Amino acid sequence: MIIICTFVSDIYIINTMNKDTKVIDLEKVVIKFAGDSGDGMQLTGSQFTETSALLGNDLATFPDFPAEIRAPLGTVAGVSGFQVHIGNTEINTPGDIADVLVAMNPAALKANKNWIKKGGTIIINSDSFAKKDLDKAGYENNPLEDGSFSGFNIVEAPIANLTQETLKDSGLDGKSIRRAKNMFALGMVYWMFNRPMERTKKFLQDKFESKPLVVESNIKVLHAGYNFANTIEALPSSYTVTKAKIENGTYRNIMGNQATAWGFIAAAEKANKQLFLGSYPITPASDILHELAKHKNLGVKTFQAEDEIAAICSAIGASFAGDLAITTTSGPGLALKGEALGLAMITELPLVVIDVQRGGPSTGLPTKTEQSDLFQAMYGRNGESPVIVLAASTPSNCFDWAFEASRLALEHNTPVVLLSDGYLGNGAGPWKIRSVKDLPDITPFVAKEGEEWQSYARDTQKLARKHALPGTKGLEHRVGGLEKEDITGNVSYEPENHEKMCFLRAEKVERVADFISKQEIYGDESGDLLVIGWGGTYGSLYTAVKELREEGKKVSLAHFNYINPLPKNTAEIFKNFKNIVVCELNNGQFVDLLKSKHDTFQFKQFNHIQGLPFKTTDLKEHFNTLIS
Amino acid sequence: MSELEIKKLSNKDFVSDQEIKWCPGCGDYAILRAMQKALPQLETNKEDYVFIAGIGCSSRFPYYMNTYGFHTIHGRAPAIATGVKLANPKLKVWQITGDGDALAIGGNHFIHALRRNIDINIILFNNEIYGLTKGQFSPTSATGIKTKSNPHGTTDNPFIPAKLALGAGSTFIARVPDTNPKAMQKIFLDAETHRGTSLIEVLQNCVIFNDKTHGDITGKDVKHDMQLWLEDGKAMIFGREMNKGIVLNGLKLAVVTIGEDGITEDDILVHNAQEENITLHMMLATMRAPNFPVAMGVIRKVKTMTFDEGLISQLEHNIKTTKFKSSDDLFNSGATWEV
């Protein structure tokens, strides 16, 4: 095999000598790429994803990387992974465990040993299994030789050496050659799943436009990997996953954080406002800042502030002066923003705070996912301080919820907390591209020059106060964090007025329920078990409920995106089920909220706090115990 | 602006209908009146002014100005002012703050506003005490001062605001006592025309908790000898007889008397507020009584690009050169596929 790849020209000859492999159709498959955090596994995974998306597969992805940028080479702490689930059928999760694992070193194998299906295929970079590599991963014996993986289809490929051989006459420096080995692995997986390489070639050409040697070398290595996989006997079959049946339209692959950013860009255009983001970098929310910072061409203003507090305060200032203002953060940052969020709330200014939740408390698990900021979003401020709380539930619908958060903030003049999470933000899936003209209108509630106006007079339906923008002649006024008198907006310490204002502000948020859609239910409207979820767990819960329904079980799902206020029909839905179970990646926060609002129902709960998404199999197993 | 559009405003136009709640005799009144007299001298419409404050006695200021105003939270006014300016750069943004608000809880935002040089004006009411919380020492209180929160005398070293501002990269620094309303007006106007962050430290008296803290500088009997009024291009001469001056002696400043030891006016340092190098400005900013007069007036005024100008020019350039005319163009860019 090595001989074949010694001469680059041979590779193309081999390519024409396709051995007679049968191509097997798969309904769906889960592939995980894992290696050192410098091995380029995220890029490899993204390329496989994009290529599969262009072939029309439905898919979902999830990257799993360490908090350290470059943990010591070869250690389990430094393993970076990227999991992709593709199918010709509806795909809603990145998959519980992988059918195929690409492990670039022993640490990657060790980190994923429990996340690969028994009997699955493991592609190993055998060049990285020397004694020193095993030591770094904490293996006393070579796991490939001691029977640890006896039930698996192990494909040992000398990826590093073959990459070196492929490029030895290329003129590329040693470091760049070593870095190209991820393309070899990608080439192998492309062959295995019968994928074309054109999309990745185009990607390399665009990315390294000014470095033709790098482009040429990476493409050579990609081909070398493809041809190697074709040639070796260890992979007897090539698989394919055909197009999924999904709604007609134009699609693109989109990451959750990107979709969030784009939802705000669309909302600003629809509201005829400029978009202002005040932000301080924090994992896993920073990609929203990165994405929006690219779009000055669409009038987007991004401000990297000196801290989380300045980030939200700059957004409050921008909102006061007339922009669609947002701030992005994660749990620890939301804690710092609490006081300022209270200011936005009492001054009744539109503002969207995006919390891409991660494992807490404190610094917690920065790169892992969790749903434990719900209480903080609901109650994390001094005084009576209700705000609207929404949650996105898939990477691509982050677009819709960012848009909806903007609509509610601007039309009701109130802050909105939008909860996303690391799983949604970094995950990706196909997005049916929206046209701005088809999105709902957004009408900011703003006073105009010459109109009769008082700063704290309210709209009778929404109870929103109309904001007057600085620069509007004749409407000069002062707002602030001190309690204001109803209607006039003058500072007031009057006891009755304070109580009235607290009630008005609470009622204003409650009345949002009149302006949102009803809670939908997946499955029948009555049955043995109603599964309740919210936010980023949608994919796993939906898949579990769908599979149980296919088995004939009377299970339905109510997955919430409107957290505060809850949709008006919430109690109606609960009435018709024998059992209700609330599933969350926390210690039971939404269930407490539901108990406090709807105390006539018996809620069971199912909680995981491991920094990981639910596994569909765990959910099904638990639901079965509830209905048996 | 055409003549037709200008309706001459008077100081009364800037007086709001709110009852002023500062203590009788508070230095804040003089600052408020100076501002209300200064603004009509500019050609800006009233609706284009925004006053933003944090928390503290001084921070009630916006309620008393009949302009747009925002009384925010403790220490954060620079960040809110930044957002206002970036959202609508044509607005004239004034931030009102005190020594606790700007230099303790809001220290971070204060230095970063100065570093960025965003086009806002900051008036720092420095009374060297916490007034609203009833008399604790502040970051500018003199070492040793006895207060409720340190009855045995503080062991803290104070900030000199102008020194901190120079370190942070400030492009406009002025100092003025609340006892000189004419000078305040002039400096407010100067600050408004400066493009960038203008910092004006007002030596303000708290009659209740720290009365006459600036008395050794502002007292009628001492003010001529204890205040050096800087004017760009003019010699640094001061004193009741206007016969004292500042010279550079080695690497230090020294006070000399004109006519003594052969000193003439030509030996006295000439102030250059526009000098980029901060060395001399730093020496002037840190002169302390009783051995030196305290520098008043505009210590530093240098031109560099402002943060808002930078952002706006990037926006304009990107909008002009992009292929994307709307969100739809962005959404359909790159790899897409049809189903």
Image: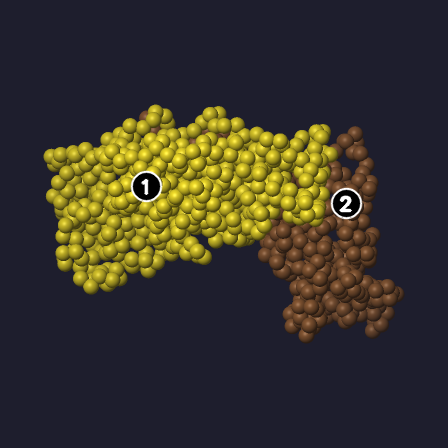
Q: Is mark 2 on a helix, strand or loop?
A: loop
Amino acid bearing label 1: Ser
| Residue B18 image label | 2
Residue marked by disc 1 = A540
Q: Is residue A269 visible?
A: no
Q: Do the residues labelled 2 and 1 touch (CB within 8 Å)?
A: no
Residue at 13%, 36% in the rendered image: A21
From the viewer's side, name the closer residue of A622 and A53.
A622
Q: Which residue is drawn at 34% across and 33% down?
A: A526
Which of the pair A559/A35 is nearer the observer?
A559
Residue type, label 2 = Gln
Q: Which colour scheme is used?
A: by chain
Q: Colour of chain B?
A: brown
Q: Is residue A379 left or right of residue B282?
A: left
- Residue found at the very far right of the displayed protein: B241
Q: As displayed, is residue A246 above or below residue B166?
A: above
Chain letter of disc 2 in the image: B
- Chain represented in yellow: A
